[in-house]
Image: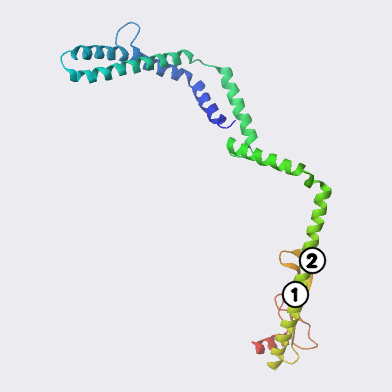
Amino acid sequence: MSGEEEDLVREAARLTNVEDLRALVGVSLGYLKGDDRGDFTGAVEATRHAYAQLDDAARFDEAVAEFVGRARSQVLELEALADDVSAYLSRLDADPERLAQIHARRAAIKDVLRGRAADIEGLLAWADEARCRVEELSSPGSDPETVERELVAAQERVLECGRRVTQARVRLAAQLAEGVNEELHALSMPDATLHIDCEPTKPTSHGCETVVFRLQPHLHARPAHLDREPPEANCHASCSHWN
């Protein structure tokens, strides 16, 4: 199947332009063999005459013998060329039925390629990949129950890793909050408190929680998200003093 599209394109071009081909090849054959009436000599006959004259001249000078050999080769080559062109011309016929088959075949190939590949070579590669995928899905390891068990096991591994990350984050968040609060108190903000919470979320590549920072300027103020909303006025003043 590989290369079929190129072959079909070439054959369609030949059948579509068969009349022009017949005219052009016929003229070239006339130049090679001459016309049937003998009005002019073709290249084959002219080369034969040249060969005969050189062969006769070689009797008087051995140096001409080289030309004789070359002329003889040209005669043989032109005779073979004329025979091949004549045979090609005899086979050159219009074939509307075959041309219709070619167009139908090319349309079918285009439909098969659509959405799968850009050419036949790509389609063959796609077919190999699809065959491997079918075999993979048909293997014992692709049984729905087996796949379900593997999925459950993978989910458990994700949750276990998430729990470990959460535990580490909670521990580090407490240490960070304690250190920051000590700094706040040292900066004459004894009532200011930084809260760092780990709010549970759906498992992602970043873990199973979102880390939220809240700053509470004093005991009676509402803790404000540092990354979501501005603190209250007294908190803003405290932050300015902290900065």
From the viewer's side, name the closer residue of 180 and 58: 58
On screen, residue 198 versus residue 237, left or right, reads right
Packing grade of label 2 (10 A; few <14, some 14-19, many >=20) is few
Amino acid type, residue under disc 2 in the picture: Glu
Residue at 50%, 25% (x, y): give it: 13
Where is residue 233? Give x, y as percent: 72, 85
Q: How is the protein colored in the picture? A: rainbow
Residue at 56%, 21% (x, y): give it: 99
From the viewer's side, name the closer residue of 27 and 208: 208
62 w.r.t. 115: above or below: above
Where is residue 55? Give x, y as percent: 22, 13
* Residue located farthest toward the right when viewing the structure as drawn: 145
- Label of residue 168 in the image: 1
Packing grade of label 1 (10 A; few <14, some 14-19, many >=20) is few
Where is residue 176? Give x, y as percent: 71, 82
Residue at 75%, 71% (x, y): give it: 165
145 w.r.t. 236: above or below: above
On screen, residue 82 versus residue 100, left or right, reads left
> Regarding mark 1 in the picture, which secondary structure is present there?
helix
Q: Which residue is mark 2?
A: 160
